[in-house]
Amino acid sequence: MAGIVGYGVHFPIYRIRVEEIAKVWNEDAEAIKNGLNIKEKTVPGRDEDAATIAVEAARRAVRHAGINAKEIGAVYVGSESHPYAVKPTAATVIEAIDAGNNVMAADLEFACKAGTAGVQMAMGLVDSNMVKYGMAIGSDTSQGRPGDALEYTASAGGAAFIIGKEKGKVIADILKTVSYTTDTPDFWRREGASFPSHGGRFTGEPAYFKHITNATKLLLEETGMKPADFTYAIFHQPNGKFPVNVSKQLGFTEKQIEHGLLTPIIGNTYSGASLLGLAATLDVAKAGDRILVTSFGSGAGSDSFAIEVTDSIEAARGRTTKVKDLIGRNKVYIDYATYLKNRDTIKMK
Amino acid sequence: MERSSARLWRKIRARYNLVGNECQSCKSEYFPPRPICKKCGKKTEMAVKKFAGNGEVYSFTKIRVPPDTFREEAPYYVGVIKLEEGPMVEGHILDDGREIKIGTKVRAAFRRMYVEGDEGLIHYQFKFEPI
């Protein structure tokens, strides 16, 4: 069965702290930090968007995999902030990684889970021998309306995963994947709208918790595994609180989720979030470790994966920068006015 | 500034991946690509050459009075980068708060260069990022 051959990630260098946003809206920063379990978030530069982040992550993934990009037969880019309404981000990615032109390419959108949907699509193509390698990317420069609770978490970042099945190249086998999808109106953005809308507390139990729980339980049932069989787990992280709570409800420990829980220090990278958590976990995982990943996308659905790390992970280590090293590199903290300018929220005409 | 799909399309390969060319006679390398070798003249064959994008700052300046296209980006750095393979390339240098000096090591990052208003094309290309 198909597995992970390589991965790469990218974050902007800009950060804004919760205190800086709370100050503008006369809110209690400490209460927000404790309530959402978040300290700061990434902010894209004025010259960054979901396409530039996807390309940077994809280039790192190709280096990590140690393959020729021309062997990649499919590229799927999941995002809810594609730069164009009509013109594929995936086409920009294949040109920028020099993958050649005989590539299946498409953009995906399923709120925060379009990246993991791309992984499943790439797995299907690899397992059916339609392509040698498939690339799935989750990349976003997510939007939060000024003054809305989302403003504290909506951030920018992305991850690219290369899927293949060649023995010796696969650093982690994907043992099983399942999905759980319903029509749930928890979060949406209409065509042409600048910011998303959401159902407030409705985004919790009937949306995030229901879908994550159902997909994860289905995966455990179909694999015959239990939480203790996994060394690590990653759950979608719209804030720092939800994944901690859902992991406890499902029987996972804080130690299992600690490496993949990035939202407290980078915010919610939407389509990138679950994949970034997986990348950070693979950075520390060893052969034989099992990893459970469950994404969540509003609207709503969850994809759940059971993954087992192979011996080949050691050979690939060092070919790309570790996620936490990239997060910790030269950060530039900005004020709220610069944040609005970077997000193009200030109307010039 | 360009407002043409065809002009943008012709430059995508070079702009995304620093694709220049190399004289097959004297091995001189060029970016952007040249139709003929400056040293050998018009009879030599020129082959496509993709540069890795690593180099160092050869010269730079900070733009405080920009053209309209980059009005919202100012101040910003532009410079001449000496690529590891040899050619000198002009480009924007990303400002991450650290001091930029002659000799600063850089890599080619993928960034948005400019957008044609609210409804036009988005132009992507390399910018140099201090390592």
Image (cartoon, rainbow, N blue to C red):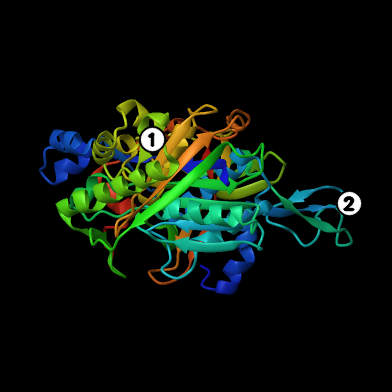
Q: Is residue A47 visible?
A: no
Q: Residues at badges 1 and 2 in contact (C-beta under 8 Å)?
A: no
Give the image location of residue A71, x and y in percent.
67, 52
Instruction: Tell me if mark 1 has few (under 14), some (14-19) or many (20+) residues whose alpha carbon lies within 10 angstroms of its own.
Output: many
Give the image location of residue A228, x and y in percent.
37, 29
Give the image location of residue A93, x and y in percent.
55, 56
Figure quadrant of residue A320: top right
Is residue A277 found left or right of B82 in the rendered image? left
Amino acid residing under circle 1: Ala
User: Residue B70 or B122: which is nearer the viewer?
Assistant: B122
User: Please, what secondary structure does the residue beneath circle 2 have?
Assistant: loop
**Which residue: 29% across, 45% down?**
A213
Amino acid residing under circle 2: Ser
Question: Which numbered marker is on residue B25?
Answer: 2
Mark-to-mark CA distance, 1 and 2: 57 Å
Give the image location of residue B72, x and y in percent.
37, 56
Figure quadrant of residue A125: bottom right
Q: Is residue A265 visible?
A: yes
Callouts 1 and 2 in the same chain: no
**Which residue: 67% across, 46% down?**
B88
User: Residue A107 or B47: which is nearer the viewer?
Assistant: A107
**Which residue: 44% across, 33% down?**
A281
Q: Is residue A151 above or below residue A187?
A: above
Residue at the disc numbered 1: A233
User: Residue A126 or B48: which is nearer the viewer?
Assistant: A126
Is residue B70 found left or right of A96 in the rendered image? left
Write down the chain letter for disc 1.
Answer: A
Instruction: Tell me if mark 2 has few (under 14), some (14-19) or many (20+) residues whose alpha carbon lies within 10 angstroms of its own.
Output: few
